Amino acid sequence: MIFDWPTRMQQMADFMGFSEEDLELVRASGPILLDRADELTSAVYDHFMQFPQTARFFLTPEGEIDQTRLDRRKHSLARWLRHSIDFRLDEQFPVFLLAMGVVHSNPSLERGYLGSVPARFMIGTMSFAQTAIAGVLLEEMLDPAQALRTSNAWNKLLMLQLDVLLAGYVTETPTPATEPPAPLGDGSGEEPQGVRRVLTNILDGNRTNGNANGASEQTQGDGQ
Ligand code: HEM
């Protein structure tokens, strides 16, 4: 795992091909999106309220809509949108994202009875945001090709953010790298063992059905 978050984000940005040009496109779209920020944030929360699994985070313990909490959250989301438009890969941004991830994965005392926001809804919300942003860009930009380029830039940026947001959920199992095994012959005659053997068999098209202990037996699909 990489804990130097700016380096990790840079590595992911390179991997995704998130370039300076993408950054420019995101920034240039700022005025358009900020003009419609209320509509965008309301759309997200209206969406949450349509599903019991997400609406419950905005209900009072008595099951009423908690309007104060909802309004506060709309402001938070608008702030996140502004931060995203001003995105720069510095020391601060990953901290903001990690804190945001932790807020969702670890409920405050006040809303402890609700538990964590399941990580899958963070992913779903990013997807919803990508679609909503693309829709606004297409409506507001005269050149559809420019709208598409800008939307692609936003898609990359939001996935870049999602990686760090989800780290607040500690979704990775930190298995440190070990020394590579010493080469044994040319390796062609060696049988993989354990889980590796099962995976190899699946990838080989299930010709033999090895179990996790390395034993194998003939399958029905083996020409019998
Ligand atoms: C892309 C996904 C999301 C983003 C960017 C986002 C953004 C934010 C931000 C900026 C805050 C304020 C954090 C703070 O400063 O304290 C917040 C809080 C909160 N969000 Fe989200 N959110 C997302 C998804 C969700 C989802 C899916 C739910 C639940 C259905 C949710 C429910 C909440 C709740 C309940 C709080 C209040 C946490 C507390 O004060 O204890 N959020 N969100």
Image: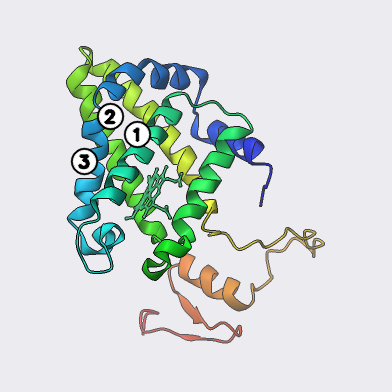
Asked which quadrant contains residue 84, the reply is: top left
Expressed as whole percent of the image width and height from the top left, the position of residue 75 reads: 34, 38
Residue type (three-letter) at the residue carrying disc 1:
Ala
Reading the image, the residue beneath label 1 is: 78
Identify the residue at image location x=53%, y=75%.
198
Could you tell whether 152 is left or right of 200 in the image? left
The mark nearer the N terminus, 3 or 1, is: 3
Q: Residues within 10 Å of mark 1 (few under 14, many from 20)?
A: some
Identify the residue at image location x=21%, y=63%.
52
Quadrant position of the C terminus in the picture: bottom left
Reading the image, the residue beneath label 2 is: 37
Q: Are discs 1 and 2 less than 8 Å apart at CB?
A: yes
Asked which quadrant contains residue 5, the reply is: top right
Label at residue 43: 3
Q: Is residue 125 above or below residue 93?
A: below
The residues tagged by marks 3 and 2 sit, at their Cα atoms, a distance apart of 10 Å
Expressed as whole percent of the image width and height from the top left, the position of residue 51 reads: 20, 59
Dot 3: element: helix
Identify the residue at image location x=80%, y=61%.
183
Pick the front one: 88 or 111: 111
Residue 204 appears in the figure: no
Residue type (three-letter) at the residue carrying disc 3:
Ala
The residues tagged by marks 1 and 2 sit, at their Cα atoms, a distance apart of 6 Å
Expressed as whole percent of the image width and height from the top left, the position of residue 78 reads: 34, 34
The residues tagged by marks 3 and 1 sit, at their Cα atoms, a distance apart of 12 Å
Q: CB of residue at label 3: within 8 Å of ligand 1?
A: no
Residue type (three-letter) at the residue carrying disc 2:
Ala
Q: Residues within 10 Å of mark 2 (few under 14, many from 20)?
A: many
Asked which quadrant contains residue 207, the reply is: bottom left
